[in-house]
Image (tube, grey):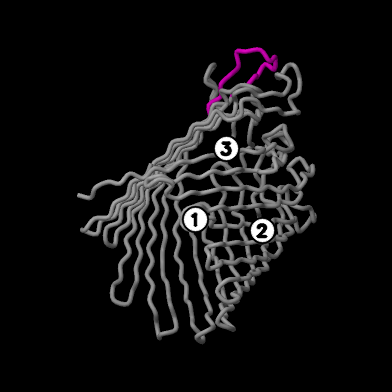
Amino acid sequence: MSYGGRFDSGLETLLSGSFYDSKGHKRLFFSEFDSPATNNGVAVDADGDQSYNAFADIIYRDFNIHVVQASRTKHIPTASFGTVFNDPRTRTTDARGYADVQYRHVFGSWETLGRLSYDWYGYHGIYIYDYAGTGVPAFTQNYDAANGTWWDFQGDASRVFFKRHHVTLGTEFRQDLQQQQINYDIQPYFLYLDDHRTARVWALYFQDEYSIRENITFVAGLRSDWHERFGNTLSPRLGLLVKPAPNTDVKAIYSSAFRAPNSYENFYVGNQSNTPNPSLRPERIRTWELDLEHRFGKTFYASGAGFLNRMNDLIVQGIDPATGRPVYTNSSPVQTKGMELELGAKWPSGMEGTISHSLQDSRNVVTRDFLTNSPKQLAKASLSLPLVQKKLLASLDAQYVSERRTVAQTELGGFFVMNLSLFARKLKENFDISAGLYNVFDKRYADSGGLEHVQASIPQDGRSFRVKLNYRPHLSAR
């Protein structure tokens, strides 16, 4: 449900909320558990999914306020992390919310933006374990949780100097008020982890867009991040934008960035899960990219991009030889290189279509091994066709994913999936109706499992459909 209003005073509001509840698949088969002791590999009523979200947006003059709250509870049928198979009580809940206030104003030649936000995140899970290994209840319930709260301030100001330099100066400050992780068995009670931490990050950044000529712009930027645990890191960015013809754009970009390990990767340990690694270092990436886009009249456009990414100290999950459990470590250098091509069109009749193809190669620089769950090819196509002008719209989208390597070092075959949808606007005065058919050809395919799974691959949904009805009441203005 959504409600929006615009008032003579300049105040604008939007309120929106949704609730979703699904029992999921009644029966799911996993061949890895195909034994009489584990219900012949069939998980029954263990795929439930419930979620809700609420959103409010308030705009008044230079102020914009966002408030968001969302939560999802998912029952886990795969018996991950060594839990009991075919027990629907294993489930996780993730909740996220924030309140964000933005202020945008022009002071003379300066355009300013200020943003203050307060965020919170909560997770808890119930995991069912058979510590005795007998397969006979009663089993032990393990409680796992993480909670975080933080506030963040960001401010920047920009203006034009000497008619050619568009300069932006800014700062950001983040204070993690709480980073709590806890894990314990409920009955009998046994505590495995109760970890509390805080953190602080401060950043300064600068960017100059220099118009060398009317059709050539050079962009240079520098960001300095100070992290309470890892000290200071500089991240430069350079770009050259050239317009050799009115319908052609060329961009060349170099940039670098980093990500500090989070508390889960550094410090988490549970009853049958991770080994902590407090010595993790931030991962860093340098990227080079060349983009070309050309428009053929008013209907067609084509674009191409080539890229090279070099990642040092990439944070990856592996098995700790000392404990036999998953652990996060910094890998040797990783490199990704590839290209992307896209062709699109938009006709006066309202018909639109795009087709794109990506080729990429991601591997460890030292061992030359390919990265897991990293396809070499991705292809997408979409077509939107108005059947009855402004009343009935049909659309098609399709995607192809090439073969991938799982974390178990097995190979997953490629797959092609197509979806179809119809949208009827104003079927009646206040009603819209849409229908979608997904995985039209009922393609059987799977995604890679993780180190927490017995399964090397997890089967995905076959053909499904959805019908959706929208109702818009006409409310009198006051």
- Residue linked to disc 1: 227
SS for dot 2? strand
168 versus 30 height, above or below? below
The magenta-colored residue range is 128-144
Horizontal arrangement in the rendering, residue 104 relative to residue 350 (left or right): left
Horizontal arrangement in the rendering, residue 390 relative to residue 359 (left or right): left
Label 2 vs label 1: CA separation? 18 Å
SS for dot 1? strand
- Residue linked to disc 3: 268
Report the residue at 59% width, 34% height from top. 269
434 versus 230 height, above or below? above
Report the residue at 54% width, 83% height from top. 216
Label 1: few (<14), some or many (≥20) within 10 Å?
A: some
Quarter-wise, where is residue 164 in the image? bottom left
Give the residue type at disc 3: Tyr
Is any part of residue 438 visible from this angle? yes
Q: Nearer the viewer, residue 181 or 415?
A: 415
Q: Nearer the viewer, residue 322 or 114?
A: 114
**Residue 312's mark?**
2
